Structures are given as structure tokens and as C-alpha cells.
Amino acid sequence: MSKQTLQIVKIGGNVINNETVLNAFLKDFAALKGPKILVHGGGKRASEISSAMGLESKMINGRRVTDAATVEVVTMVYAGLLNKNIAAQLQKYSCNAIGLSGVDANCILAHKRIVKDVDYGFAGDVDAINSQFIHLLLQNNVTPVFCAITHDKNGQLLNTNADTIASEVAIGMSELYLTDLNFVFELKGVLENIEDKNSVIKEINSKTYPKLVDKGIISDGMLPKLHNCFNALEKGVNKVKIGDVTLVKESIKLYTTLTL
Amino acid sequence: MSKQTLQIVKIGGNVINNETVLNAFLKDFAALKGPKILVHGGGKRASEISSAMGLESKMINGRRVTDAATVEVVTMVYAGLLNKNIAAQLQKYSCNAIGLSGVDANCILAHKRIVKDVDYGFAGDVDAINSQFIHLLLQNNVTPVFCAITHDKNGQLLNTNADTIASEVAIGMSELYLTDLNFVFELKGVLENIEDKNSVIKEINSKTYPKLVDKGIISDGMLPKLHNCFNALEKGVNKVKIGDVTLVKESIKLYTTLTL
């Protein structure tokens, strides 16, 4: 029997930080047919609430350092405020969303990142996805909405990068579904020329990818993002798309598709 | 076919505010056999975090007045911080907990309380329980942990009294299960003599209840609590128990049982 296609869509701060943009996106996401999963990052709300509470956000290499007070704040903001408001909007648009963190039904098991050069504190690296439970939800027309909080099954909540959550969920579900992983970010796709916002490279595969890196067309922040994407493809994900907030609209034609 | 027994346990601030007490309780709850549901209140953390953020908690007749800023805080604290930490502890004790609010899979649909004398703001009165979805979880050995946040299916999150959530979930599940509703509070049960903490009235039924009220043995804060319990019994709940934090231990013998 051929596998059913599963759409996994990850949204980050650029969508979450603007309520109008977020609601328009959620309406489009709700209209997507077939089984689907949403993964969301945190945006600037965690930093805002941290500072309202007198805490300081500490970042190293663009990653948040999660001390005990910070893990409380991100749990509140990601798993509480953002996750439940997103689920409520999707319910409004007749999408039967369920807001989840990795702890819930043990969906995403992780371990505290081993300290090498930098101690990121309570940052979680993913060990396992509970694909059977997620499958049960999907088969009952329930749409999981994951925030980027995981746990270690020893009572500790952990902060995990949302791109990683999306990739790992897509990899984990690939045994049961043909998984399409969609990254929504601030650009229309991977650009040939950073000055021209419409110069989207429509397709990149594992042969053209190293050439684009050599030419310097893919550099800086795009490197770990695309590394993450090709890792997902190598581990069984069917297709990866990168595009802007219109990526989930059926009519949209401009985005980057990555394949092996 | 006879119905399976479902245990629904509600814990309030007196359990949640003390981490040692909470963890001991969660260990006992995890050991409870058969299908079960946990409902938790908020405790003092919402007020603490509100004031850390410079917001003021407003109470009228012992109920929190939920303005737009407050609904954000209680969503963060109840659905995020407390709900996920409770789920993580239960996972540690090998109970496959799933932390949920009413918005998730539309488990608890409510409407904003109609303003009569007092405007409680974004306070939700419960309309419907998604018993089929909760049943699906229970049949898959997943234990729902509900916080006291509901939604109106129009994108609005609402703050609902946790005792009410427990009763409504118990009533809603009674079509499918023989439901036992357990209220954990600060006393060993309903007391004959408030000065004697062991003077627990072991059984109260709908005939003895009005007599206890007449005699003034049940008064003040116990009145709405017991009213809520008898309402649940009248609407199909099998049994209601009221006791302290040891109520979920099999060995415990001292508590109040309410029946029709």
C-alpha cells in the first residue's frame, strides 16, 4: 500500500511576531487538506516576558542559553501562551488542533545537551519521536501543533530548536507517511541573489547543493538551515520546501524544493 | 456490558504550591490502576508571575477577574508552566500523561460568562466535553491532565474554575464510564467539627446533606463545593470523594463519600 502524504509545517518568529500575519497563515494552514502537523518557534515573546519579569535573555551563537529560570519562561510562553493561542485560532478555522509539547504522551523524548565548548543549559537534543501516538491523532483527524519544548522522561523539561523539532518529527513519521517538510521563513526561498527577493532557486538537490555552497550563493545562516534539511532527506523525509508565509497556499508557485 | 470505572482527580493550590507535596501526590496518582484523569488548578504561581510582570490580581467573591492581560498570564502559568511540569513528573513515574487545555482537540468548549452583576471578564462557563476524544486517549493508556483553560471555538481562550472543569469532565465521561470524582483539598474530608481535623463525616447523601446544612455543620466555603458535587451526582457521576492529598492512595480509609 502506498503511504499517505503528511505535511509538516514549521513557522518561526517572523510569522508569530505579527498577529495579522499569523492569523492569515493559520487560516491557510487550516485549509490544507490531508494529515498535517504544525511546529512553531517562540519569536520575541519569550524575550519580552523574560525582561518583564526582570530576567535577561542570554544568547550564544544565536542560540538561547536556557538556565532554570529561562526554562520556566519558555515553557510558559511556548507551551502555554503561543501554543494554546495557535490551537484556539485553528479551532476557530475548523481545524481540530491539539497543542502539544514533547512531554505530552511522550511525543518527543530528548536529553540535556552534553556540554562540550558551550553549556547551553537545559537545551534538549532529540532522541525519539512517538510516531505511533502521533499517527493515532492524525488518523482521528486531529492536527498536532508542537511547541519546541521536550523532556527527558526524568521530570526535566528542555528547550529544543524548533527547526530541529520539525525535522525530527518529519524523520520519525517517515516510517508511516510520505513526509513533506515545509519551512516557512522570511524569504520566498533560497535566493540566487540576496539583493533580488524574487531570485528563488526552485530546486536544489544533493548534487547542486555543494556547488551553490562553493559559489558562495548559500552561506552564513542558510548553511545550518540547509544542512538540517538535507539531514532530514537522508533520513527518509520525502521532500523539503522552503518559502515564505504563503508556502501553504495551494496557489503558491515560488519556493525552493530540496530533494536528494 | 458493565462500564469501566474512570477515576477523575482534582488537585488545587494546596497541593500545587508545595513541590514536595505535589511530587509525592503525582507518584501516588501515577500508581493508580485503570483509566484516570487529573485536573489541576493554578495555585499561587499565577499571582506571583502576574506581580513579577507588574500586573495586579483582581478577585471578586473569591474568583479571579480575568482581563485580557490576566488571560495571557493564566494561559502561560496553567497551560504552560504547571501543566507541562505535572505531565513531565508523571512521565517520570511511568504514567503516560498528556497535558491538555480545553482548546486541545476541542476537549472543553465554553462560552464567556454572561455579565449579570459582576463582569468576570474572560471567564468561561462550560458547554460541552469531547468525551469521544478523551475516551480515545484513555483506551490507548494515555492519561489526560487538564488545566483550567477553555475556549469558545471563536479563537478566545477562557479561564474556568478547576472544580467546575473536574465536575464537567466527570459528567461528560459518565455516558461511557462509571465515573468517580475525587476532590483533593486541605482537609481529610467534610468535618463534623471544624476544630477536630479527624472528625470526618464518612458518608453524605442527598437526604443527610440538607440536614447537615440546617445544623450549620456544612457552611461557608463548603456550600458551593458540595453543591457542585451533588450537581455532578445528579448528572450521572457515580461517586464523589473529598479528602486530603492521600486520597489517591489505596490504603487511605478516611475521606468523605458523597452519593445521591
Image: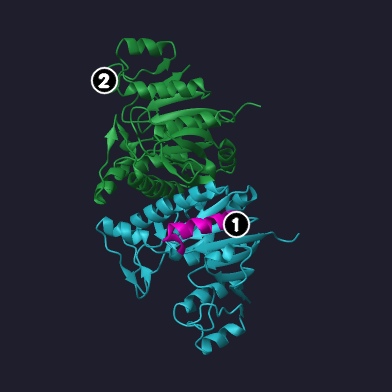
Chain colours: A green, B cyan
Mark 2 and mark 1 on one chain: no
Labelled disc at residue A194? 2
Which quadrant of the structure image shows residue B115? Answer: bottom left
Q: Nearer the viewer, residue A9 or B227?
A: B227
Q: Residue at x 64, y 62 (%)?
A: B175
> Which class describes the residues within 10 Å of circle 1: few (<14), some (14-19), or many (20+)?
many
Judged left or right of residue A126, residue A22 is left
Q: Residue at x 38, y 44 (%)?
A: A78
Q: Which residues are the magenta region?
A: B15-32
Name the kind of residue labelled 1 in the image: Lys
Circle 1 residue: B36
Q: Secondary structure at mark 1?
A: strand
Which quadrant holds the N terminus of chain B?
bottom right
> Residue under mark 1: which chain is it in?
B
Q: Is residue A255 visible?
A: no
Q: Main secondary structure of the magenta part?
A: helix
Name the kind of residue labelled 2 in the image: Ile
Residue A216 higher or lower than A188, as above or below? above
> Percent position (x, y) of residue A45?
30, 45
Labelled disc at residue A197? none
The span from disc 2 to disc 1 (Cα, nearest Å) is 55 Å
Judged left or right of residue B222, residue B203 is right
Residue A197 higher or lower than B60, as above or below? above
> Percent position (x, y) of residue B57?
30, 64
